[in-house]
Amino acid sequence: MVNHSLNKRRYSVIAVIVASSLSACGNSDSDNSNTQQLNAAEQVAQVKNNYEVNQHDIKHWLGTHIPLTNGIGSAQDSSVTVTQFGKQINAVNNQYQTENGFFSIHDDNTIVYVATGDKAEQFIVTFANAKQQDNNTVSIANIISDPLVAQQWHLENTGQLGYARQPDLADHWRVAQTVGLRKDERSVEENLVMRLQETVTIAGEDMNVKAAYGQGITGKNEIVVVVDSGLEILHEDLIDNVLPNRSLNFNVSRSSATDPTSYSMGGDHGTSVAGLIASTGWNGLGGRGVAPDSKLIGMNFIGRGIAQTDQNNMISHGLQGSGIQAHERIAAFNRSYGRDLVQFSSFDKIDEAISLYPAKYLRNGQGTLNVKSSGNSFKDSRPSGTLCEHTGANELGLTCSNTLFESDLNYPHYIAVGALNADGRRSSYSSAGPNMFISAPAGERGDWEPAMITADQMTCLRGYAGNEFANFLSNQVYAIPGIAEKIYPFNAGAFAENAACHYTNTFNGTSSAAPNTSGVVALILSANPQLHWRDVKHILLASADQNDIDDQAISIAAGNGSFQAHDGWVTNAAGYPFNNQYGFGRVNAGEAVKMALNYHNPLPTQITTDWLANTQLEQAKIIPDNNATGLEITINVEHDMTIEAVQFDLAVFNDEFKNMGVSDQQSTAGIDLAIEVTSPSGTRNVLLSSKQALLLPQDFTNQANRPSSSHGFIINGALIASNAFYGENAKGEWRLRFIDTSNQDINSASPLHNGYINNSVNSELQRAAIRIVGY
């Protein structure tokens, strides 16, 4: 509480009257006039009022309103001076930077103070005019924080390493590389020199979460549903935010239907995901979630003993049986899982209807987003093995697996989230594609480069941090007993902040990027609960930071010419920068909250056109082998509407591209295929880059009238989407180009096939249609 009368002292007004002497000559009327003028010129000394304002228990980074005394009127009616240690502080954009925080002054004579450090401090705010001066001595006493937050670089990057790259890491890593099983292609010493020279973290490359808290927004009243492997509902840093008896356990051998706690010995993915969203803030424990005052519901939808039936899928989307009611403030369903796919999946109307339910009916019809990981297959995947080392994708810097292969990510009511490192660039594993929407921090492995610091299964007996997993890494991965605890000392309990192993500093993957984004969604809706789910998407993309601005375009050889397989950053005709690796850029929590608080023009009602097909495809069109010109077709759109997403229905066939056994050699027709699309406004986007692990024919398992198992469709009936044209006008001629980029065999086996032989017959385009989602 603020005591405005504490030590209040007033000084009396001293009126100084300057007397005038009368002249010995002249008339009396003139003398009186001069006397009145002199009396009007009296001088008044300034009244000085001193006040002390004591503010206790300030929450670190959280904007705290502190009322000051200003007898002059509003701050606009007076000059303002701020001093600390006898030195004046000048405002920059109405913000005063003090030793351990900053504040702004409002017209109602309050300041909003944000503590950026953990120390007490004092400063003086003075309001003054010619007659009065009010001095407010503001004393900030106790700063409440969380012990791990200083190392959580995704919240605020100051150049810290999140307990990675410990001083003796090089010695332990050298031993592990020399003796153990983890060996790279370069020599150990060459690798070591390279690693030591790497810049792995850059101050400022973060989510700007502090700015959201500075506006007083922490996710309060919002709920995030964590659909994952589990959730330790009694975790010390989650228990206060887990809604009692609302979580669900899908495991058939469950002992409790409302406790999805995982008893895996090697870490619980869902608990760490939940920690990134809503680890309780300012409780003196662990770290801090992006939305530390939001609430959690856990559902163990993935993992052993769990059947991913349609019923469980419906429940995990908030339908009947989930316990979720239409009026509840469910901000997001976080889905940090996916599939390692090397083929397109067929469009499933039932799946679409299920996944659309939260967008149509929850939050009283305002809708809830599904936030999903884009995938961790930029370099390789389980089905493709090391294939992309041999296609050239790795060396060129092209994604091995395309995010188009994950069917859910092509729905407008889902958003695909990519992963970033502490230097602002793509995490090594983060898959890319045209349906990418946004990116968020996730990091690497936590040894040389920082990963995420988040909640782990409690105690050192199980979890990513603990004896069991350390023994597994030491014995099974490194083949050196006890080496893991030296490479990952934080996980081994070597730091006082994690002596009990309740937290980990090695969580990563797009599994981390998604919950960091879900946390920002909770902040946005906490700031403005009336927002529609489409407006939330708009705010996310419109407020995003354009990270890695030097990301370069990539061209590949194709016949006697070349094909630009990656465009880097392209600003579309509506002014939005887009990149297949990053979507619209990195989430910016502070700017997103600011937009939400001042958002007054919601998007018009969304409409979706019918499928608009190319009328010239009465017979198949040939896509010539190894030819940079390729095949180009056009589709005319007559709808005068603003684009939110563009969807495509394509059928590409090759007679040699069939289901085969592992011992057989597959055609390269899928690997060689590239597809680009150009909008009527001239914006180009690459749907397929070629060199990708497109190894199996179209999956028709969800279609009743599917072709035989030997069919040769590279793609047919899959819903694929691009976000690159957001905000443009759809009307006009759309151009699609299909290119086969190579005539080379790939003499490398994958877990699926024993090598890949260049297709001896040309691929064929049999169908092409486009559908616009927008308003």
Image: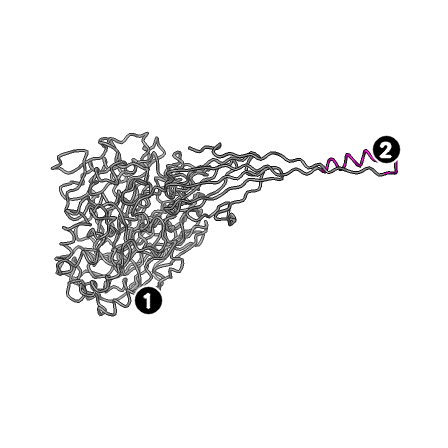
Instruction: Between residue 166 and residue 507, name the one nearer to us.
Output: 166
Which residue has dot 1 on it? 557
Residue 109: x and y in percent read 51, 36
Q: Is residue 634 above or below residue 413?
A: below
Predominant SS of the magenta segment: helix
Please rate how many residues cluster around mark 1, counting C-alpha atoms within 10 Å: few if below 14, some from 14 to 19, many from 20: some
User: Where 229 falls versus 153 (above or below)?
Assistant: above
Q: Position of residue 357 (x, y in %)?
A: 29, 35
> Which residue is more in the foreground, 231 or 744?
231
Residue that mark 2 sits on? 28
Residue found 35% across the figure and 65% down from its top: 562
**Between 36 and 300, the one nearer to me in the picture:** 36
Q: Amino acid at mark 1?
A: Ala
Alpha-carbon distance for marks 1 and 2?
Answer: 106 Å
Residues packed near mark 2 inside 10 Å, few (<14), some (14 to 19) or many (20 plus): few
Q: Please give the range of residues in magenta.
A: 24-41
Say what secondary structure mark 1 lies in.
Answer: strand
The answer to which quarter of the image holds residue 75 is: top right
Q: Residue 131 lies in magenta, yes or no?
A: no
Residue 37 belongs to magenta span: yes
Three-letter amino acid code at disc 2?
Answer: Ser
